[in-house]
Image (cartoon, rainbow, N blue to C red):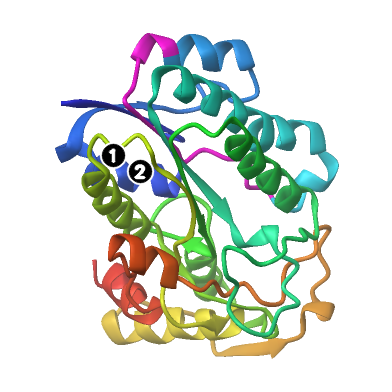
């Protein structure tokens, strides 16, 4: 059985990976308490102790706005740590799977982003994730970098849980309607990852950057409206205070970090190479809420 090390224990994707990868090997899971990604020596020590065949880095600094005032910590976790993981993977010829983000783009493109499109992050978070990608590719260990977008799930901090909480408390919400993306369920990402790992076998020639996001697209306003509408249909006896969800432009909701206007990713490459295709975001939302 392969030794699989998952980083990001309490995160949305890592939580699901613990289930989906369990049948493919002996899984060890580290959170920030077991392994501080801002501590290079600790990374090296802990990874060497495990001696994994596969390293799945689902950990990241994801506080997009806070990153604007904590650039050093953000860079340590999102840029420096992936490079160290890549060096360790190179020495042992382990496969490194790393998750990245649509925030490497500026969102000015009017069609879905390809892996080969020019990157131009708008903020500290996006720049740090791009630097992490580049660090891994520079080391050139066996690796797969998976860019995803608008991740949500039934735990942690995410848009879905925030909307359900606010919908129970408030009668009206104002949600940005001019930023477009594909809400992607963390479980779908984990299931796709396990499919890819199963296909890779002992292939240590793997090198690749792939988009991995749900099919379809919507705005934050459209996503919020579907969350509330589907929830009410599924659970008519549960009270929600919300009466109106109003669309607003992003300019009416200023944040420290600028977000891409277009976060839609083209997933044709991962379909062609691995046969992996995530469901439409609306279908995945229905499946999650039904659980």
Instruction: Give the residue at mark 2.
Output: 15
Q: Residue at x 54, y 34 (%)?
A: 140
What range is drawn magenta here?
48-63
- What whole-number distance in Å separates the C-alpha atoms at marks 2 and 1? 6 Å
Q: Is residue 69 left or right of residue 80?
A: right
The numbered mark at residue 18 is 1
Name the residue at 71% across, 76% down.
261
Question: In the visual, does 254 lie left or right of 168?
Answer: right
Query: Is 96 left, or right, of 238 in this rendering?
Result: right
Q: Residues within 10 Å of mark 1 (few under 14, many from 20)?
A: some
Find out whether the residues at labels 2 and 1 contact each other: C-beta distance under 8 Å: yes
The disc at residue 72 is none
The image quadrant where one finds the C terminus is: bottom left
Total tally of numbered discs in the picture = 2
The residue sitting at 41% across, 52% down in the picture is 155
Find numbered disc 2 in the image and state the secondary structure of the residue it sits on: helix
Q: Position of residue 253 (x, y in %)?
A: 79, 74
User: Residue 57: x, y in percent?
Assistant: 47, 37
Residue 288, compared with residue 65, is above or below; it is below
């Amino acid at each position: 059985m392969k030794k699989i090390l998952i980083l990001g224990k309490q995160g949305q994707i890592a939580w699901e990976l613990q289930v989906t990868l369990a049948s493919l090997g002996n899984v060890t899971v580290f959170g920030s308490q077991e392994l501080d990604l801002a501590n290079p020596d600790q990374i090296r020590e802990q990874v060497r102790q495990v001696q994994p065949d596969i390293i799945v880095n689902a950990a990241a600094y994801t506080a997009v706005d806070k990153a604007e005032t904590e650039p050093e910590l953000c860079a340590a976790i999102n840029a420096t740590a992936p490079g160290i993981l890549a060096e360790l993977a190179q020495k042992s010829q382990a496969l490194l799977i790393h998750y990245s983000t649509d925030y490497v783009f500026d969102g000015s493109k009017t069609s879905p982003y390809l892996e080969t499109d020019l990157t131009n992050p708008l903020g500290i978070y996006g720049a740090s994730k791009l630097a992490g990608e580049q660090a891994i590719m520079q080391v050139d260990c066996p690796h797969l970098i998976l860019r995803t977008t608008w991740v949500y799930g039934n735990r942690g901090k995410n848009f879905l849980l925030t909307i359900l909480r606010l919908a129970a408390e408030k009668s009206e919400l104002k949600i940005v309607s001019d930023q477009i993306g594909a809400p992607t369920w963390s479980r779908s990402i984990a299931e796709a990852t396990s499919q890819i790992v199963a296909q890779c076998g002992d292939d240590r020639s793997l090198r690749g950057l792939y988009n991995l996001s749900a099919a379809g697209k919507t705005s934050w306003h459209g996503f919020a409206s579907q969350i509330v509408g589907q929830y009410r249909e599924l659970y008519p006896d549960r009270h929600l205070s919300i009466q109106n969800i109003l669309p607003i432009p992003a300019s009416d909701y200023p944040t420290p970090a600028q977000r891409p206007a277009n976060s839609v990713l083209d997933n044709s490459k991962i379909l062609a190479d691995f046969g992996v295709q995530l469901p439409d975001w609306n279908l995945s939302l229905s499946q999650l809420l039904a659980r």
